[in-house]
Image (cartoon, rainbow, N blue to C red):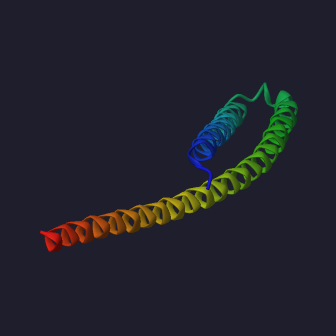
Amino acid sequence: MADLTTLIRLHKHELDEKRRVLSDLYTGMAQLEHQRRELERAFEREKKAAGDAGNIHFTFPQYVEKTNRERKVLDDQEAALEKKIAAAKDSMMETFSELKKYEMTQEERDRIAEEERQFKESREMDAVGLEVFRRKGEE
């Protein structure tokens, strides 16, 4: 039976890489959420300023349109990022599942090898015991 430790190590490395990618995607999502909060804060400030100053209210509709376009861009970016996150999660779970299969197979192989080693050792000890018994009988 082949030793699976190299394959296990490879899958662990692959899993770590996929975790890093997923972490980067979550960081990107957090940045988008931060941008959205900043956009909303700026919008509220401008809305308040437009209400306070009577002479700049004619530019506010263009600002609202610009803000709505920026919201749409953020929504599109979040949707694309959510798809990437879902795909990365699926890929990571698949790699994790494969890793567990290999680890369980290797553990079973190690257990069988240990049982065989113990059986062989026991048989050898029995043979030594019989030989000692036989020699004592000859004396």
Location of residue 129 by image quarter: bottom left
| Left or right for 34, reference 119 | right
Residue 27 on image: x %, y %: 62, 37
Q: Which one is nearer the viewer's eye here, 134 or 50?
A: 134
Location of residue 66 by image quarter: top right
Residue 45 on image: x %, y %: 65, 33
Q: Which one is nearer the viewer's eye here, 109 or 76?
A: 109
Furthest-left residue in this view: 139
Residue 109 on image: x %, y %: 53, 61
Count the marks. Answer: 0
Q: Which one is nearer the viewer's eye here, 52 or 38?
A: 38
| Left or right for 50, reference 124 | right
Q: Which one is nearer the viewer's eye here, 124 or 102?
A: 124
Q: Quadrant of the N terminus?
A: bottom right
Tell me if residue 107 comes above or below residue 129 in the rendering. above
Location of residue 7 by image quarter: top right
Tell me if residue 55 comes above or below residue 113 in the rendering. above
Residue plotted at (57% across, 42% down): 9
Q: Quadrant of the C terminus?
A: bottom left
Residue 47 on image: x %, y %: 71, 37
Residue plotted at (31% across, 67% down): 127
Furthest-front residue in this view: 138
Residue plotted at (79% across, 25% down): 56
